[in-house]
């Protein structure tokens, strides 16, 4: 046998051995356009888990004034609790143990696969440090030492590297631009900016303002203050730098985990119901599964299609939802659901219905390989250490299950793999009608309160929005009608936290729309004021309970003036960085006294951030903010 054939044979044997070794552990696979986890026996499955399955307070530390969960008040031993809890979870259709749980004890008690939550970037200060510095790498390697003992366990799914890190693009950029030249990340940022602006500091200053005012690019090497953005500008060097910072983090985190355990999955860092688009791109180059927590904006349990479709397009890796939630004011633990932006309904029946719908929708997403409910038990009535006091639990603080909720999970969990193969419901999204779309009539009156609670969100969703390059869509649009008005709903995530340098409304978040009415009249409007509230600001901005102000029409070339608005109404609501808005255009402004089924209109809508730099629009044929009539979507009002 020739040496070449010997080498080829040795390579084939090595590859076969690696494949056998890989098959001994849980892995991912894409089949027929859908992603799955696959166990050692080759069975495809979704990871259906709960988070924070632990024993709660120790009896000696139980606080009667703030009575949280205490397992040993209900079970004689830790093992007895683990056996009973694993049996419960499996009876409710769960098949794994989520993060921040007693994973070893529960896995042993119920033969359940499990995930392990690490703190790597958070421990060293990411994103405010360079994760690949010698100090950061040493700290990460020390932090993963404990998982070396798990590397041969076939029940380990993988490792979360962090949870809810603060990847605020513009804030991160501003922070490092302000640092002294000795900071290696500042040096990298300066080099990127020098290349992006061809060394022309005047060009730089048209986008970014700093103090002291630089006379040359060399001046930007110094320590800078008062960093802001010129009107309507979000320079792409921000994206480039933040993606580099994320690349540094994911490279270091992946290397640390794989050195300690080369056999199991790297599960990403659990985004906080938002994600930076350049960060998600970097994650996809290193994580086996990209993970995100997710908070719905709809009591119905509707799930934002754009959030998950865009995340998958960016990362090109399967996704896992690592926290999602529903709470109710009616609960047995005394939780008041005050400290946080999470979905709260009134009754346990509404909670079970919302959780059922949300779980089914998550299971149907082709990119998703698992969903983890947050959490196993209710939080203490006076709040946990950080004040969070929500009725999140599958069980209350007395260890009694919420029967309606666990029944909903039992039903959906047992059908989850079937739902995953079926995919999205045929009734989701506006129906097609020849060359156009059919807009359904609202089931009842709409109050125009900005919350979208009264909307039937599934049939009114406008599918496949577009976005201005290099960004991908970050908003969902909904259309419905009543005889009195055409209504447009907006729901979007503002992934950019930093403000702008001016108060000019054309520099702020804006909603734009164009409707050609039944008489051929073109009605085009821009609405601003997103985030504005009514009344003076409180001293403590963290507890700002003022109502949000109505949206206002602003003057912009090619659109109506406020004086010609014709009775248009717009209102907004917000949930953390989620923005919701609805706009009602009166029938009279569209050329008729009353709208009726069969009327044909032409429509375009968009959300614009940072002037015109970031934009998501519908229909996808639009080529920007010009809204040429030929690009508008033809819509017929349905029944």
Image (cartoon, helix red, strand yellow):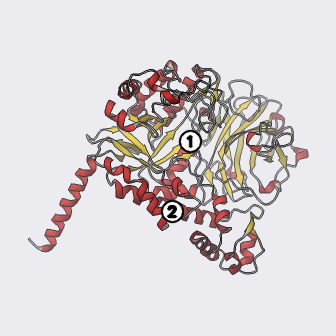
**Left or right: 384 as drawn, with respect to 607:** left
Across and down, in percent, residue 406 comes to 47, 23
Across and down, in percent, residue 187 comes to 60, 74
Rendered position, 58 above or below 257: above
Given this view, does label 1 or label 2 mark the residue nearer the observer?
A: 2
The residue sitting at 70% across, 49% down in the picture is 607
- Furthest residue in direction right, as rendered: 563
- Verify CB contact (< 8 Å) between mark 1 and mark 2: no
The residue that disc 1 covers is: 305
Across and down, in percent, residue 380 comes to 58, 28
For label 1, count other residues whose C-alpha is less than 10 Å away and answer few (under 14), some (14-19) or many (20+).
some
Camera-side residue of 187 and 360: 187
- For the image, the number of numbered tags is 2
Give the quarter of the figure containing the N terminus.
Answer: bottom left
Question: Where is residue 7, by image quadrant?
Answer: bottom left
Q: Residue 131, labelled with which disc?
A: 2
Rendered position, 273 above or below 183: above
The residue sitting at 71% across, 54% down in the picture is 609
SS for dot 2: loop
Camera-side residue of 12 and 274: 274
Question: Where is residue 387, by image quadrant?
Answer: top right
For marks 1 and 2, give the CA distance.
Answer: 32 Å
The residue sitting at 39% across, 34% down in the picture is 417
Across and down, in percent, residue 568 comes to 82, 39
Camera-side residue of 512 and 248: 248
For label 2, count other residues whose C-alpha is less than 10 Å away and answer few (under 14), some (14-19) or many (20+).
many
Nearer-N-terminus badge (1/2):
2
**Left or right: 217 as drawn, with respect to 418:** right
Answer whether residue 426 is visible to the viewer in this image. Answer: no
């Amino acid at each position: 046998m020739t040496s070449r054939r010997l080498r080829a044979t040795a390579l084939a044997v090595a590859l076969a051995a690696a494949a056998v070794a890989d098959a001994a552990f849980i892995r991912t696979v894409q089949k027929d356009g859908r992603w799955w986890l696959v166990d050692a026996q080759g069975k495809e499955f979704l990871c259906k888990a709960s988070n924070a399955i632990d024993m709660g307070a120790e009896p000696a530390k139980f606080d009667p004034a703030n009575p949280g969960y205490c397992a040993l008040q209900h079970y004689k031993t830790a093992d007895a609790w683990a056996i009973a809890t694993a049996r419960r979870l499996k009876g409710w259709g769960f098949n794994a143990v989520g993060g921040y749980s007693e994973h070893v004890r529960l896995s042993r008690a119920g033969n359940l696969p499990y995930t392990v939550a690490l703190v790597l970037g958070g421990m060293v200060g990411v994103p405010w440090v360079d994760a690949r510095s010698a100090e950061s790498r040493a700290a990460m390697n020390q932090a993963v030492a404990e998982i070396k003992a798990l590397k041969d366990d076939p029940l380990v799914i993988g490792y979360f590297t962090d949870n809810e890190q603060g990847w605020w693009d513009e804030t991160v950029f501003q922070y490092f631009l302000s640092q002294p030249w000795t900071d290696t990340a500042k040096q990298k940022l300066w080099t990127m900016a020098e290349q992006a602006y061809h060394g022309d500091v005047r060009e730089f200053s048209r986008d970014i303002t700093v103090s002291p005012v630089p006379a040359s690019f060399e001046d930007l090497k110094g320590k800078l203050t008062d960093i802001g953005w010129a009107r309507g500008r979000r320079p792409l060097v921000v994206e480039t730098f933040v993606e580099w910072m994320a690349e540094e983090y994911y490279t270091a985190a992946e290397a640390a985990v794989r050195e300690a355990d080369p056999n199991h999955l790297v599960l990403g860092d659990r985004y906080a119901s938002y994600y930076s688009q350049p960060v998600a791109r970097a994650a996809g180059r290193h994580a086996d599964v990209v993970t995100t927590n997710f908070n719905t904006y709809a009591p119905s349990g509707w799930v934002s299609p754009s959030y998950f479709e865009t995340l998958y397009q960016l990362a090109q890796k399967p996704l896992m939802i690592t926290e999602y939630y529903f709470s109710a004011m009616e609960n047995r633990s005394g939780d008041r659901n005050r400290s946080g932006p999470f979905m709260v309904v009134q009754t346990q029946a509404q909670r079970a219905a919302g959780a059922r719908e949300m779980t089914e929708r998550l299971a149907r997403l082709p990119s998703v390989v698992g969903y983890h409910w947050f959490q196993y038990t209710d939080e203490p009535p006076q709040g946990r250490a950080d004040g969070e006091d929500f009725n999140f639990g599958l069980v209350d603080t007395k260890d009694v299950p919420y029967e309606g909720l666990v029944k909903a999970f039992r039903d959906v969990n047992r059908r989850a793999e079937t739902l995953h193969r079926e995919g999205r419901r045929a009734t989701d999204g506006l129906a097609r009608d020849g060359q156009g779309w059919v807009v359904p009539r609202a089931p009842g009156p709409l109050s125009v309160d900005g919350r979208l609670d009264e909307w039937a969100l599934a049939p009114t969703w406008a599918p496949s929005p577009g976005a201005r390059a290099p960004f991908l869509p970050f908003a969902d649009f909904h259309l419905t009608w009543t005889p009195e008005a055409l209504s447009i709903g907006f729901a979007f995530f503002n992934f950019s936290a930093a403000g702008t340098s001016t108060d000019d409304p054309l520099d702020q978040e804006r909603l734009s729309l164009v409707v050609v009415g039944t008489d051929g009249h073109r009605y085009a409007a821009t609405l601003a004021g997103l985030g504005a509230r009514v009344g003076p600001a409180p001293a403590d901005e963290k507890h700002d309970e003022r109502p949000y102000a109505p949206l206002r029409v602003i003057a912009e070339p090619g659109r109506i003036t406020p004086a010609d608005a014709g009775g248009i109404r717009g209102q907004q609501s917000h949930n953390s960085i989620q923005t919701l808005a609805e706009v009602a255009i009166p029938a009279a402004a569209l050329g008729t006294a009353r709208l009726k089924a069969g009327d044909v209109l032409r429509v375009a809508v968009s959300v614009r951030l940072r002037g015109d730099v970031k934009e998501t629009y519908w229909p996808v044929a639009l080529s920007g903010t010009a809204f040429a009539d030929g690009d508008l979507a033809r819509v017929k009002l349905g029944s």
